[in-house]
Image (cartoon, rainbow, N blue to C red):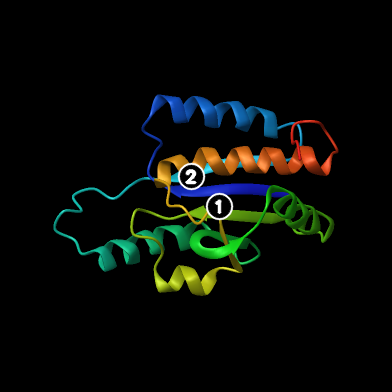
Amino acid sequence: MKVTLLCIGKTEEDYLKKGIDIYNKRLKHYLRFSMEVIPAMKNTKNISEDVQKEKEGELILAKLLPTDHVVLLDENGAEFSSEEFSSQIEKKMVSGLRNLVFVIGGPYGFSDNVYQRSNEKAALSQMTFSHQMVRLIFVEQLYRAMTIIKGEPYHHK
């Protein structure tokens, strides 16, 4: 199974880039993982939030294949413990799913069309994080899930 993290805009902060790189390298031992970045829109000061969400939504939808299983990382999504998340990933792996795509939206979330295309929503926390920080939190949790699946000692109860 291939896992893709699709996000809007590049990661700005060096400390986040370094953390993402660490877990990206670790994940290569477990599964095919990639992070795809859709360039952030420019000159958005004169564009409403709804129009920005629609335009970003079009860019997101253009990256998805009809066979992709799409999970939106959304504050209103289902919440999982690390063990529950690893169980969800493992179920998807054994089901024969080929492409699992997690999507982080822009600062205003997702358009209705993206919500309609998605297969499910997941929340990383009830707290709100910057969409830049969510990238690092997500790749760490995906790595943690893989170590739980493999019975490795990274995760402690």
At horizontal 66% and vertical 43% (from top left) the residue drawn is 142
> For residue 94, what is the image quadrant?
bottom right
Indicate the secondary structure of the residue bearing disc 2.
helix
Position of 46 relative to 86 (above/below):
below
Q: Is residue 41 left or right of residue 147?
A: left
Which of the two marks, 1 or 2, is nearer to us in this view? 1
**Marks 1/2: CA distance?**
8 Å
Which of the two labelled residues, at mark 1 and mark 2, occupies the earlier sequence position? 1
Residue pointed to by mark 2: 134
- The amino acid at mark 1 is Leu
Crowding around mark 1 (Cα neighbors within 10 Å: few <14, some 14 to 19, many 20+) is many
Q: Position of residue 33 (x, y in %)?
A: 65, 41
Q: Position of residue 80 (x, y in %)?
A: 65, 57
At horizontal 55% and vertical 64% (from top left) the residue drawn is 77
- The amino acid at mark 2 is Val
Residue pointed to by mark 1: 124
Q: Is residue 8 left or right of residue 150?
A: left
Crowding around mark 2 (Cα neighbors within 10 Å: few <14, some 14 to 19, many 20+) is some
At horizontal 36% and vertical 59% (from top left) the residue drawn is 56
Q: Residue 116 or 108: which is nearer the viewer? A: 108
Quadrant housing the C terminus: top right
Position of 21 relative to 75 (above/below):
above
Indicate the secondary structure of the residue bearing disc 1.
loop
Q: Position of residue 138 (x, y in %)?
A: 57, 44
Q: Is residue 120 left or right of residue 104?
A: right
Q: Are marks 1 and 2 in contact (CB under 8 Å)?
A: yes
Q: Residue 107 or 43: which is nearer the viewer? A: 107
